Image: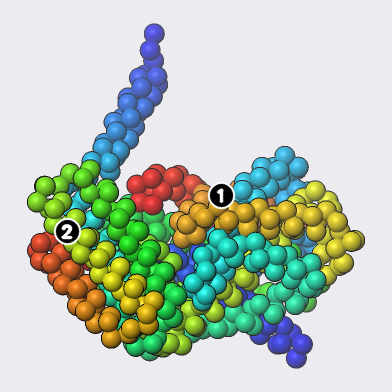
Amino acid sequence: MPTVGSRTNYLTSKAALVAIALLVSSCSSRQPDAALRKEQQTIVSWIETTRTIADAWKNHRVPSAYTSRTFKTAQQTLEQESRSIPALPISPDAKGRLVTTIELVHNSLGQAVAGIDKGERPAMDPVIDQLETAKQTLEESAGGPSQ
Amino acid sequence: MKKIFEMALGIVTSVGGFLEIGSIATAAQAGSEFGFQLVWAIVIGTLCVIVLVEQSGRLAAISGRTIPDAIRERFGFNYFLFLFLALVGVCLLVLGAEIGGVCIALELATGIGFQWWALPVGFLIWVLIWKGTFSVIEQGVSFLGLVTICFLVGACIMHPSWRELSSAALPTLPDHDKARYWFVAVSILGATISPYLFFFYSSGAIEDKWDESYLGVNRFIATGGMSFGSLISIAVLVLAALILLPLGIHVDHYSQLPLLLVPIFGKWGFWLFVASLGIACLGATLEVTLEIAYLAAQGFGWNWSENQPPIEEARFSLTYTIVLLLGSLLVVTGIDPLKLTIFSMALTAATLPVSIVPFLFLMNDKDYVRDHGNGWFSNVVVILIVALACLLVLVTIPLQIFGG
């Protein structure tokens, strides 16, 4: 026969299970807004990283090897992000905008790496402009600066 | 005069020992994502580590025993073995992260991938330990580690709001990314309250032949050295908050870290960062490697001392050789050093209770500390640290899943 103690234990364990289930579901179900914001945040972070480094390289503040390597890392990271976009719970329009921005940034960085190999520092100016435009486009589509 | 020199040296050494890839990476992530908001985690971690380091040094100076030695004697071999396995597992990951840090510095400087540097760096460290004495290793790298003061200078140049900074020393709740916030807080605590730090400190006290007359020196070094080290960590956080956060740069990759100093010092900023990272991680690699060897030797009753020739302590020497090889091989696999760092720091936090609970018993046992045992206040502080450590055990894995 169940005692008061065992009934209390039963209720406690059931409450704990419900709490864990709620915690897991609240953490794992990504809302569309949150998913979009997170993705934009990652892209903006890499755009700003590469833009700042491009500007520093143009002004002889960082070595070419470091600049080139970081740009290649940024390209790889953005490729990975691009592959994960189809699975995001966001609208097809938003997905399209993200993919277009990533392609634009990817191409600019490819252009920049070629310029670094040739040591053409003034050639970095259009790349910096393109990165700035990409960031603005992303922020406008998000309705404000992303942080 | 000798004691004053030793105190100054101790502070320099503590600064060198405090800052490593874990504290740089976690502080940079905290600042770039949450501004000044996580300063409290560094402050709390520092207070805890000051207490534990002071007690480690006091125990060594009075009893002539290191913490692992005393743990084995007081709690028996089985408890020691449990502690040994838990710590060695975590320390190997931390070692991989630190070797990775040195390799990253070399990659930043040369453009050659970090994996290629792992074995040469492992060999260089092995030669330093094989040939060097304890004081050469401790003081040489620590003096070079003073280059990390550039973070402090940089933070002052940026003119942070001192009011905002001081108010961030008290914990506050996050207004966004709650799981991430707590995960970064746990990682900071793991990077700050590293068992290897206070275990290594007690071994160092024995190597330097401390006795009862060193209690004042010990207190001064523990408080001054750790506080100064934490100031540099806070400086890294401030730089990330004032430079990276406004640009929207989150630290996801180590190649983003030089941006902490380049905007302030220009070309020199890049090289100062590379030197700081390389030297800080080299110092930490030496300490973690030696600590694993000390732990094994003290627990299993082998001969140990970095001041003796390797032939007189073959098992101690063999241990650090194997440990270095394993740590280097971890980096050779190409594992992302930043991810390894953050993971190992969180895991360090999860193993803290096993290392800290024995302090409560050892520091109140007259057989070890005679009349220099803990007072009620010190005991309450250690109990609070144990409670914090237990909380970290409970939350680390869920936070790793949801916020890591």
**What residue appears at the point 20 percent right and 64 percent down from the top-left corner?**
A104
Judging depth in this view, the residue of B222 and A24 nearest the camera is: A24
Q: Report whether A41 appears left or right of B112.
A: left
Q: Report whether A107 appears left or right of B236.
A: left
Q: Chain of mark 1?
A: B
Indicate whether A11 appears above or below B329.
Answer: above
In the orientation shown, which residue stands out farthest toward the front?
Answer: A118
As shown in the figure, which amino acid type bears the numbered disc 1?
A: Thr
SS for dot 2? helix
Where residue B119 appears, x then y in whole percent? 65, 61
Q: Residues within 10 Å of mark 1 (few under 14, many from 20)?
A: many
Judging depth in this view, the residue of B211 and B11 nearest the camera is: B11
- Location of residue A18 by image quarter: top left
As shown in the figure, which amino acid type bears the numbered disc 2?
A: Thr
Where residue A123 appears, x then y in whole percent? 27, 82
- Location of residue B294 by image quarter: bottom right
**What residue appears at the point 72 percent right and 83 percent down from the top-left corner?**
B6
Indicate whether A90 appears above or below B125.
Answer: above
C-alpha separation, residue under disc 2 versus residue under disc 1? 46 Å
Q: Report whether B117 appears left or right of B215.
A: left
Where residue B94 appears, x then y in whole percent? 57, 57
The quarter of the rendered structure image containing the N terminus of chain B is bottom right
Q: Residues within 10 Å of mark 2 (few under 14, many from 20)?
A: some
The label shown at residue A100 is 2
In the orientation shown, which residue stands out farthest toward the bottom?
Answer: B1
The residue beneath circle 1 is: B351
Q: Say whether residue B119 is visible.
A: yes
Q: Which is closer to the viewer, label 2 or label 1?
A: 2
